[in-house]
Amino acid sequence: MNKKLISGTLSVIAANLTFSLFGQKAEKPNIIIIYADDLGYGDVSCYGATAIKTSYIDRVAQQGLKFTNAHCTSATSTPSRYSLLTGEYAWRRKGTNVLPGDASAIIAPGRTTIASVLKKAGYTTGVVGKWHLGLGPAGGPDWNGEITHSPLDIGFDYCFLIPATGDRVPCVYVENRRVLRLDPSDPIKVDYQKKIGDWPTGKENPELLKMHPSHGHDMTIVNGISRIGYMTGGRSALWVDEDMADTITRRAVQFIEKNRNKPFFLYFATHDIHVPRVPHPRFAGKSGMGPRGDAILEFDWSVGEILNTIKRLKLDKKTLIIVTSDNGPVVDDGYKDMAVELLGNHKPAGPLRGGKYSLFDGGTRVIFIARWTGTIKPGTSDALFSQIDLLASFAALTGQKLEEDDAPDSFNMLNTLLGKDKKGREWLVEHSGRLTIIKGDWKYIEPGPGAKIQINTNTETGNDPMPQLYNLKNDIGEKNNLAEQYPEIVKELSKLLDQIKSTGKTRNLPHILVTSN
């Protein structure tokens, strides 16, 4: 038998074994990732919040497996999403920091992603919602023509996008390769370096604002809100912030309905609870915590719409649903929306220290719930898990073979995801400017310069010129630095982190690259 035939035979055997192991027929499960934006570990009631009730997320937790030690890879949006989709740590690639709204694509066409792996397995694949990974070739996208270097070039069959973030121009939706509802006689122009056109800005015309910036965010005004960056044109294509959750949730539901009779993968990346927080009027004032709390309720509603659709279509036993977040929480992130003043006793990061932008676990330990009715036993898992492992795990689930250079940092953690393995990873890496590593109960933060508090957001960054070592089992809030007390553990974890950085990839290496001796 030649190598290709052997490889193909092994893939078929692997697929059959996978489905027989987990009590499934050869039918592949639908997969939905619901990806919140800036939702904190303590922002939902099933993770301990008492000031707010997230009924639909709680339902997923009651019917599925709630992870208490799951992590995104980075404490900010772009790098976290990059790692999720590609299975590669974003810090290995230049240009993967938080992107402007006119950035070119940072995932090259043809790159292996979760979507491309599942497409090869026979899935119809779609992404709806926030993208923030760039579009177009070098120089950025052609907003007035065909948009290339898009999700359609990395394995997605359908896309309906918020190109970057709600607080960045252009404030338009992109469906597949075109800006939605664009009038060719009113072309879009975007600039992040200088003002263009005659549209008013928050800095020059604050009297036109319905929401004022607290820092930055004072450029072009769209829908009474000033943004980052300048734009003009595209009036017929502009979004209305209050309708954003309805718009993207409706598209997500339509994608599910259209593909109900065949295996599908949906990456549903909501805008909530990112700034500007402008929830629909039916949620406004309902939380008692201002727009930030109202946006949490709106996100919970979006989760509910997906759950209700799956139930209505009788797809519960055929669908793996994951609810998680791109990074930790931030309260004031650029707009005066009373988030700080109305926070009360609510703790967005729960027991964790830090938040978005932070090296502490408040930036990267996130809610993560997996539900697959009839396959995943409901409960709680404290297994160490990283979002970066979803690619390799989905490949294993669907019997796909990854090539040598695919998903360089993604491990097959399918047993952990399905609740069969209670331990999880041996170690994982987190990122926010610098790197941290968790191995077992220990977390090491590499030393380096930088401010200890991010002034604009009042977030503890975790920056320190001295090494930091925390025992997360005894000190989940990372209050007691034990680096001086346990220098041998600092040495071991520092060496392990250096090896991970120098290898360029970790998927084909043992989980434990070094030992304490």
Image (spheres, rainbow, N blue to C red):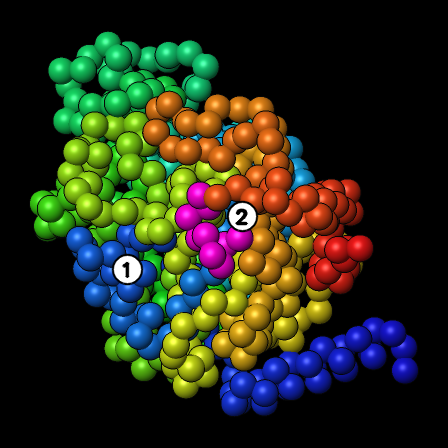
**Location of residue 433 (image quadrant):** top right
In the drawing, what numbered circle is on residue 470? 2
Q: Residue at x 52, y 71 (%)?
A: 417
Q: Is residue 339 left or right of residue 516?
A: left
Camera-side residue: 51 or 273?
51
Q: Residues within 10 Å of mark 2 (few under 14, many from 20)?
A: many
Give the distance between the C-alpha atoms of the residues marked 2 and 1, in whole angstroms. Answer: 23 Å
Q: Which residues make up the magenta segment?
A: 470-479
Question: How far from the left and from the top, in percent, is residue 303?
Answer: 29, 62
Q: Main secondary structure of the magenta part?
A: loop
Task: Determine if residue 108 is in view.
Answer: yes
Asked if residue 102 is positioned above or below residue 216 in the image, the reply reads below
**Screen quadrant of the N terminus:** bottom right
Taking the image as shown, residue 154 lies to the left or right of residue 257, namely right
Instruction: Name the one closer to the observer, 258 or 412.
Output: 412
Residue at coordinates 90% horizontally, 77% vertically from top-left?
Answer: 2
Residue 470 or 20: which is nearer the viewer?
A: 470
Q: Residues within 10 Å of mark 1 (few under 14, many from 20)?
A: some
- The residue under label 2 is which amino acid type? Tyr
Q: Is residue 250 left or right of residue 23?
A: left
Q: Which one is nearer the viewer's eye here, 28 or 450? A: 450
Q: Which residue is mark 1?
A: 48
Specify whether 111 is left or right of 470.
right
Query: Of callouts 2 and 1, which one flags the residue occurring earlier in the amino acid sequence?
Result: 1
Please give the name of the residue rendered at 44% of the width and 80% of the height, measured from the top-left corner: 376
The residue tagged with tag 2: helix, strand or loop? strand
Q: Could you tell me which secondary element the residue under label 1 belongs to?
A: loop
Name the amino acid, label 1: Gly
Is residue 478 in the magenta section? Answer: yes
Q: Quadrant of residue 172 in the image?
A: top left
